[in-house]
Amino acid sequence: MLHTEEDLLTSVTKDSKMMEILRAAKSLNLPDWWVCAGFVRSKIWDVQHGYEEPTKLPDVDVIYFDKDHIDEGEEVILEKQLYKVFKDVPWSVKNQARMHVLNDMAPYHSSVDAISKFPETATSLGVKLDEQDRLIIAAPHGLDDVLQMKLRPTPAFLNNERSWLYEERLRKKNWISKWPLLDVTYGKI
């Protein structure tokens, strides 16, 4: 079981596949980069459920923030570079300096600002390697929800015009079928 940030750091550091993915992402030398969302959340929930094998990820989200190069074509080039390193990883690379437009939100100020506006608190997570190859975590809403397996909306999706998107994600992702110990908050709070 994972109880603290240190537990999470240790668990990811001991996972050779996760570390290889993080090294590959770091090799792109992107500004303000993170591997985020399900990559981190699924690891935590798998450990909390006692799973020996990792749950298959639909994608590995690599995000970065570069206001000077917002052409979507840049992201495609970066994904191709990552596929050359790991063909079997479902890479998704997105520049958060442009994603606010697709998400119909105010411009983000950084990648961590973008992470804070992901739909669920348990998904609002990122990890990366710093200059000394130490693992660091971004958790704008903290780690309590994800560690306690609570699934609820972030403030950006709470009791507003985006609430339906959170509900739709719950239906489509059907996380409870993969991780039955989840405590899911439905509807408006």
Image: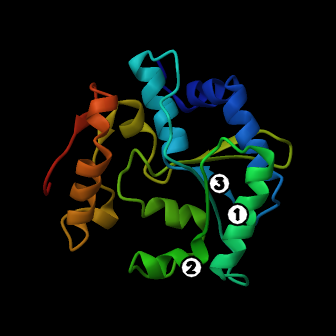
Q: Quadrant of residue 29?
A: bottom right
Residue at image x 79%, y 58%? 81
Q: Which residue is mark 2?
A: 98
Mark 1 surroundings within 10 Å by alpha-carbon count, few (fewer than 14), some (14 through 19), many (20 or more): some
Q: Which residue is mark 3?
A: 34
Mark 3 surroundings within 10 Å by alpha-carbon count, few (fewer than 14), some (14 through 19), many (20 or more): many
User: Marks 1 and 2, Cα distance to the nearest angstrom?
Assistant: 14 Å
Q: Judging from the image, what secondary structure is the residue with disc 3 in?
A: strand
Q: Amino acid at mark 1?
A: Asp
User: Marks 2 and 3, Cα distance to the nearest angstrom?
Assistant: 16 Å
Residue closest to the eye, 158 or 94:
94
Q: Which residue is mark 1?
A: 32
Q: Earlier in the sequence, mark 1 or mark 2?
A: 1
Q: Amino acid at mark 2?
A: Arg
Q: Judging from the image, what secondary structure is the residue with disc 2 in?
A: helix
Whole-percent x and y of residue 98? 56, 79
Q: Judging from the image, what secondary structure is the residue with disc 1 in?
A: loop
Residue at image x 52%, y 20%? 53
Q: Is residue 69 left or right of residue 52?
A: right
Whole-percent x and y of residue 18? 67, 34
User: Marks 1 and 3, Cα distance to the nearest angstrom?
Assistant: 7 Å
* CB contact under 8 Å: marks 1 and 3: yes
Q: Foreground mark, 1 or 2?
A: 2
Q: How many marks?
A: 3
Whole-percent x and y of residue 7? 57, 24
Q: Is residue 149 left or right of residue 185?
A: right
Residue at image x 16%, y 48%? 186
Q: Image height check: is 2 above or below 42?
A: above
Q: Amino acid at mark 3?
A: Trp
Residue closest to the eye, 17 or 58:
58
Q: Earlier in the sequence, mark 2 or mark 3?
A: 3
